[in-house]
Amino acid sequence: MSGATATGYGVLAKTLHWLAVAAFVLQFAVGYVMSTEVDCDPPGEDRSGGDTSDAEEERLDRLEEACEAAAGEEGALATAWADLWDGRIGLDGIALPELHLLLGLAILLLGGLRLGWRLIATLPPWDPRLTATDRRVAHVTERVLLAMMFVVPLTGLALVAVSDDLVALHVAAHVAFFVALGAHLLLVLRRGLLPRMLPGAG
């Protein structure tokens, strides 16, 4: 049921494929809209300055100072990374930087599952509409995209956990991913191959 068929991929291959697609779409959406600055304004800060007592003002100031001290100069992602390792992530809800890190880890897990499945499962035969050049393009782009399931999140984690000097490496991984994705989509759409990966097909 989960193996390849003569006309398409099996259920498990399709499920892993579309989970990876969803994870990457959400990951890039979160990554491009989130702020990397830590918001240290505590709840109730908007009422300060006349509507709160001196004791409440001092409490809010202490909360803000503690947040700023914890964040240091690293920003929201580093704070989320520290929270993850300390087991504090998600205690006050999932913020976008935390979701970004969790999605990166999920993509790594999916990459491992896809790689493991690829090593033990059979692939369907080449579609007869594919030329020799098409097959080479498919072969290369699929391997690059699989590799990017590791490279993109790992360079992102290195950027947070090791040094923000690695931002160029993370950006380069993004570029490689989008180039391979563009070539992959162009081939799939031009040759009408999408049904091979849709649920219920094959």
Image (cartoon, rainbow, N blue to C red):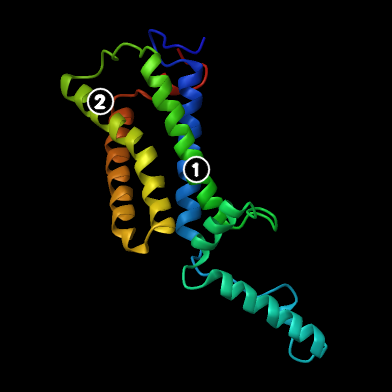
Q: Is residue 142 left or right of residue 72?
A: left
State which mark lies toward you, 1 or 2.
1
48 or 73, nearer to the observer = 73
Residue 153: image location, x then y, percent:
41, 46
Type of amino acid at the residue the image marks with label 1: Leu
Which numbered circle lies on residue 30?
A: none
Residue 96: image location, x then y, percent:
56, 57
Image quadrant holding the C terminus, namely top left
Q: Which residue is mark 1?
A: 105
Q: Is residue 201 above or below residue 32?
A: above
Q: Secondary structure at mark 2?
A: helix
Please tell me which residue is depicted at 35% across the width and 12% down the height of the picture.
Answer: 124
Residue 167: image location, x then y, percent:
33, 59
158 or 193, nearer to the observer = 158
Type of amino acid at the residue the image marks with label 2: His
Picture quadrant where residue 121 is located? top left
Q: Secondary structure at mark 1?
A: helix
Please tell me which residue is depicted at 39% across the width and 38% down the height of the picture.
Answer: 149
Q: Is residue 199 visible?
A: yes
Q: Is residue 109 above or below residue 71?
A: above
104 or 160, nearer to the observer = 160
Q: Residues within 10 Å of mark 2 (few under 14, many from 20)?
A: few
Q: Going by the picture, which residue comes out furthest to the left?
A: 133
Q: Is residue 7 left or right of residue 176?
A: right
Q: Is residue 38 visible?
A: no
Q: Which residue is mark 2?
A: 139
